[in-house]
Amino acid sequence: MAQNFKHQPPLTVPCTFPLGWCWACCCPPCHAFIHRMEVLGDKWPENYYLCQNMYEDIHEKCVCCPDTANKLPYPCLCFESFCFTGGAVSGSRYYLSKEYGLEDTMLEKVFGICLAISVFCGLVGSFYAVLFTACLGNQQTYELKDRGGSSKQPLQP
């Protein structure tokens, strides 16, 4: 049976992990880049794919450049993190969910929908995307550390 991410609700992340949340808000692409490498751990770069192929569940043709991502993982992750930050964080979340049998709560699903919609809302949407991404990314970092994974991200309660 699937379980939820341990740190709940994700809206409490700014108060629980202020340093990590500020870091993720100040440079979301940097956070997403480092976080993906940490999530993959010793499977980096062999198991790296753009957005971790999370859209493959929708349709098997929705796999993004697997050959390029495996041959050039650092430039591809840099591109993904800086151009599709929400997708980079979501890809890491997708990988953690599959790896540990985790499931999003309804609130986390709403966060994901808000992130997707916020991309089309200009500057205000970007502001909300940064806040949501920081919350979800730090929740994932906490989960990774809680399960014995290593992390260089600043995450201190």
Image (cartoon, rainbow, N blue to C red):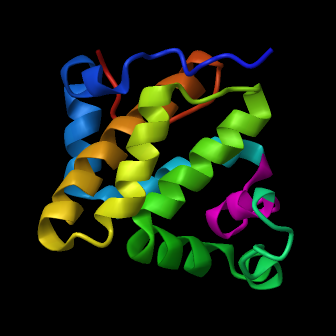
Task: Quadrant for the N terminus, please.
Answer: top right
Is any part of residue 153 visible from this angle? no
Rendered view: 6 above or below 14: above
Residue drawn 21% across the image and 52% down it? 128
Question: Can residue 65 be seen?
Answer: yes
Where in the figure is residue 108, as x and y percent of width and height?
46, 33
* Left or right: 70 in relation to 4: right
Looking at the image, is 64 positioned above or below residue 118?
A: below
Give the residue at x 57% y 70%. 77
- What residue is at 72 percent from the left and 77 percent from the top? 64
Report the front residue among 29 and 1: 1
* Occupied quadrant, residue 125: bottom left
Occupied quadrant, residue 67 = bottom right
* Count of numbered labels shown in the rendering: 0
Residue 141 in the image: state x and y as whole percent. 48, 33
Q: Position of residue 112 (x, y in %)?
A: 45, 47
Farthest residue, direction left: 124
Residue shown at 60% from the left, 54% from the top: 91
Q: Is residue 27 above or below residue 78?
A: above
> In which quadrant of the rendered image does the C terminus lie?
top left
- Examine the structure image and report whether residue 33 is included in the region drawn in magenta: no
Q: Is residue 29 above or below residue 102?
A: below
Q: Is residue 8 left or right of residue 129?
A: right
| 83 left or right of 59 in image | left
**Towards the viewer: 26 or 5:** 5
45 in the magenta segment: yes
Where does the magenta region start and end?
Answer: 43-56
